[in-house]
Amino acid sequence: MKKGQLQIQESIFVVFIFFVILMVAMIVFYQLESRNIKGIKEEHDENLFYYLVSYVPSMPELQCSVIGVGDECIDLSKARAFSFMNDDYYREIFGHRKIILEVNEDIVLYNWEPSIYSGERKITSPVSVYDPNQNKYLVGVLEVYMYEE
């Protein structure tokens, strides 16, 4: 074998090893970034889960109001009407969750359960509820369930 052929073979071998090392580095980088993105998504879902406890009572669809001025309570008649809503708009906001208002009865405000889930988490919060039929305020409990997939 001539010296020139040997150098060409060595160069090809070095380039091959370089590309193998590059491919392994890219696979490792992809795996690390994939785990990082999954962790960020889980953290975002967790924050949204806790945010819903304060967001739901302040929604204009549920909030008490007198002549257009909002109050920090849930209107019981609005909550009953809202429980019959089935809109894709709320699926984008709430996702796979269940929201229940307990006063004297359980009012399921929202429920979109995934077909398969491994468990569920629940957070509760006391809320002020106004009953316009009796013209009085009640203490209710807002329960938010998150399905773990």
Image (tube, grey):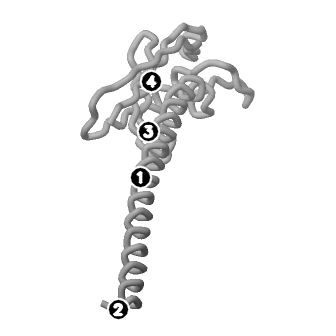
Q: Which residue lies under the disc numbered 4?
A: 144
**Who's the residue at 43% across and 26% down the image?**
99
Q: What's the mark number on residue 85?
A: 3
Q: Which residue lies under the disc numbered 1?
A: 28
**Who's the residue at 38% across and 17% down the image?**
106
* In contact (CB < 8 Å): disc 2 and disc 3: no
Question: Which numbered mark, 3 or 4, is in the foreground of this view?
Answer: 4
Q: Secondary structure at mark 2?
A: loop
Give the camera-side residue of 11 and 123: 11
Location of the C terminus by quadrant is: top left
Give the camera-side residue of 19 and 71: 19
User: Which mark is first along the chain, 1 or 2?
Assistant: 2
Q: Secondary structure at mark 4?
A: strand
Inspect the image, locate mark 2, and give the three-letter code of the amino acid beneath it: Lys
Residue 38 drawn above or below residue 14: above
Question: Which numbered mark, 4 or 2, is in the foreground of this view?
Answer: 2
* In contact (CB < 8 Å): disc 2 and disc 1: no
Q: State the image coordinates of residue 14 (x, y, percent, origin top left).
A: 41, 73
Inspect the image, locate mark 4, and give the three-letter code of the amino acid beneath it: Val
Residue 131 drawn above or below residue 33: above
